[in-house]
Image: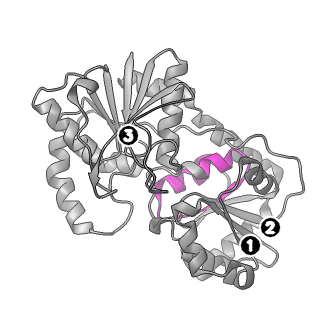
Amino acid sequence: MKIVHVVRQFYPSVGGLEDVVFNLALTQQQAGHQVAIFTLNSNYQTGSALAKYQDYQSLKIYRFNWFGSSRYPICFLPPSQLNQYDIVHVHAVDFFIDYISLLKRLKLINSKLVLTTHGGFFHTNKNAKLKQVFFKTITPFSLSQCEVVTCCGIHDYKMFKPLHNKTYLIENGVSIEKFGPAKHTHKQDSYVYLGRFSSNKQIELLIELFEKHAPNNSKLYLIGQSKAGGTQLCKQYNFSSLHSNVELKLDQSDEQIIDILSQAKFVISASNYEGFGLSVVELMSYGLIPLLNETVPSFKRFVTESNTGATFQVTQQDFALRTKQLIKEWDESKAQLAKEYANQFNWKKVNQRYLDVY
């Protein structure tokens, strides 16, 4: 089967969406399919222009000119190139799905069109009313030309299912021990957040809660990229003098990240919106026990189904209670439950689910 994944950002850009598309594409290629990536020709994180073509880990990456907003980039992919593939798999609800759907409606492409929603466009409340209008008008029009719609989280599934009768829940796969094997070292009462520093992650709130209300001698590590909000965070906070129990770790190598994960006990997130929560499950694969914002449906599932960790209300009292309770009750058996739960999300199983709906 010939498959092309269409996504606004891909390698060398770093992030959850990019990671999902890379692992799915690589797994499909390893299963014997011909796989390519269509993406934009610049890196949002660095602003740098990218080559029109690149071969990365045997995946063929084709990059195209675009203009407009990074949230809704205008990019006119040539129908002749899309028609070279049996499956056109679009990731995220942006211009690509609206445009390719129109091409299908005009009978300019014959390929099977598949959409994976990845949280839609409701990650923040910015322009909320406009987004709702768009979702009720343009989005159903676009989805009508998709053969299949897949959602990587319960929240998405409930939102998109009324718009398309072939909507499936296929949760993201996870790279087990993504950064390499853990080291055998002394465990500390430390919590780790890993990911982007975007507004929905509520990093400022997490810093405030942890600094003022976490147990003495506990520590919070914030791991991310300078170009994904880290530089702005440095401007807001003087971590060296103001936050003795909070450390910001930017642009870390895999080995440096392993050093932190190997001695940590918990993964933490105060995020108020997630399509899935990929990085949480990735860190659970290292035996880190989750402490997660209770308002996110997938976070509740991670805790309930793994039978370890806790969710918290974003209040001073509840945060203090939960952090103290998890530290007091931690043991190796609970860490093992986190590892076993993460192992359910291996990419071979997830890929087979996609092949079944293709």
**Mark found first going from the N terminus, 3 or 1:** 3
**Amino acid marked by disc 1:** Lys
Q: Which residue is mark 1?
A: 324
Instruction: Confirm whether the magenta stretch covers residue 305.
Output: yes
Color encoding of the figure: one colour
**Amino acid marked by disc 2:** Lys
**Amino acid marked by disc 3:** Thr
Where does residue 62 sit, x and y in percent of width and height?
Answer: 39, 33
Where does residue 102 sit, x and y in percent of width and height?
Answer: 15, 37
The image quarter in which residue 140 lies = top left
Where does residue 147 sit, x and y in percent of width and height?
Answer: 25, 29
The one nearer the camera, 40 or 26, is 40
The residues tagged by marks 2 and 1 sit, at their Cα atoms, a distance apart of 6 Å
The residue at 9%/31% (across/down) is 106
144 displayed left or right of 283: left
The residues tagged by marks 3 and 2 sit, at their Cα atoms, a distance apart of 47 Å
